[in-house]
Image (cartoon, rainbow, N blue to C red):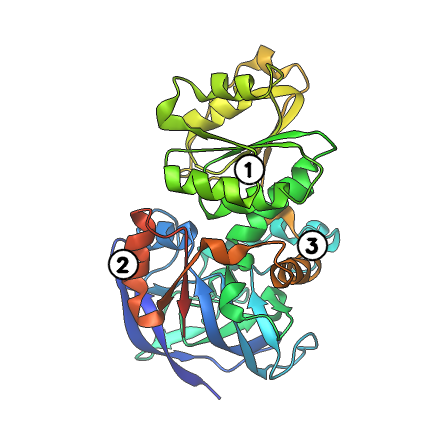
Amino acid sequence: MSTTTRAAVVESGGAPFTLSEVVLDEPGHGEALVRMAAAGLCHTDLGVASGGLPFPLPGVLGHEGAGVVEAVGPGVTGVAPGDHVLLSFTSCGGCRNCRDGHPAYCAAWLPLNLLSGRRADGTSTISRGGEPLGGHFFGQSSFAERALVDERSLVKVDPDVALDSIAPLGCGVQTGVGAVWNVLEPRAGSTLVVLGAGAVGLSAVMAAALTPATTVIAIDKVGERLALAKELGATHTVNADEVADITEAIMEATGGQGADGVVETTGSVAVLRKGVDSLALRGTLVIVGAPPFGTEVSLDVNGMLGGKRVVGLTLGDNETQTAIPVLVQLVKEGKLPLDRLISRYTFEDIDQAVADMGAGKAIKPVLTF
């Protein structure tokens, strides 16, 4: 049986979110109907809503959902009605990378999560007035009071943890954490630099504080965010507006050695290049921030010959069924103080949340239902 619910629809690129009554298809094979409790707002949502990223509009976005399972379709074995779940990305489950524990690099990742707005078989999950809408965003489209979700997007979580306090784990937080834990893997005494102190960057700072790294440098242009970074575990901060060159600032803070690891979250190729130039011998820079498609960056080739590496990253390279319950437990124990990043808004105030995020007033808006 189909389900009528209320969703935030983007009618066209650059249009605001409009609350509208939509119809969800009945749960098919490997799908569940989830009553949403919260959904984080991410820059990827804003990029699609602005028309800057490819996705069929009108459509329903949202990919950091959290809620309670109401019904399941055929073949669903991992969750049951009543379970508390976090919603993340989907994947095919059968390609080489999925089988190898790297579903963020699924061979079908782009069409399943972003490009098509439909299920893998081409059918629509959401309609309005009998016309299909773009949906199935990250296998969830969670900017709605109820969502039809791929089982591979679902992670069962501890029901004692408030869902609005962990919704951002679905994308931004696990990305920042994974950049540190899964790629950089700091050793004792390592020096890490985080470029950009937004939600992803501050998540990387929190993750670094839980490693043997002894120097964690956060760089941003907003003093308040740098102060928060210091509270969350950064040992040094640099205001990019107050120094002549951030590479020189990093070299000074590291005693001329450079950084063992850099997390680049800004999406600026100029900042990315500065980060590469500040790497120590055999250092690694992780590209997290995503500029417009087709953007290129130039590098000093001879400068790379000292064993430097530049690595791209999607969603922290996490296997969500393993990683997310661990992150939830760390939130519960206060070791990952995610609530310090969150500003809560009612679902009806989604456009205010968008405005505050764009203006830098909110680090991680979370919609509550």
* Gap in angstroms between the C-alphas marked 3 and 1: 34 Å
What amino acid is labelled 2 in the image? Ser
**Would you name the residue on which mark 1 appears?**
234
Which label number is shown at residue 98? Answer: 3
Q: From this view, report whether residue 241 is shown above or below residue 347.
A: above
289 lies left or right of 337: left
Q: From this view, report whether residue 192 is shown above or below residue 12.
A: above
170 lies left or right of 45: right
The earlier-in-sequence mark between 1 and 2 is 2
Q: Nearer the viewer, mark 1 or mark 2?
A: 1
What amino acid is labelled 1 in the image? Ala
Q: From this view, report whether residue 170 is shown above or below residue 271.
A: below
**Would you name the residue on which mark 2 appears?**
12
Q: Quadrant of residue 191?
A: top right
Q: From this view, report whether residue 185 is shown above or below residue 26.
A: above
* Label 1 element class: loop
The earlier-in-sequence mark between 3 and 2 is 2
Q: Nearer the viewer, mark 3 or mark 1?
A: 1
Decide which of 216, 39 is in the foreground and name it.
Answer: 216
64 lies left or right of 22: right
* Gap in angstroms between the C-alphas marked 3 and 2: 33 Å
What amino acid is labelled 3 in the image? Cys
Question: x, y (%) of residue 112?
Answer: 53, 59
The residue shown at (27%, 58%) is 12
Q: Quadrant of the C terminus?
A: bottom left
286 lies left or right of 340: right
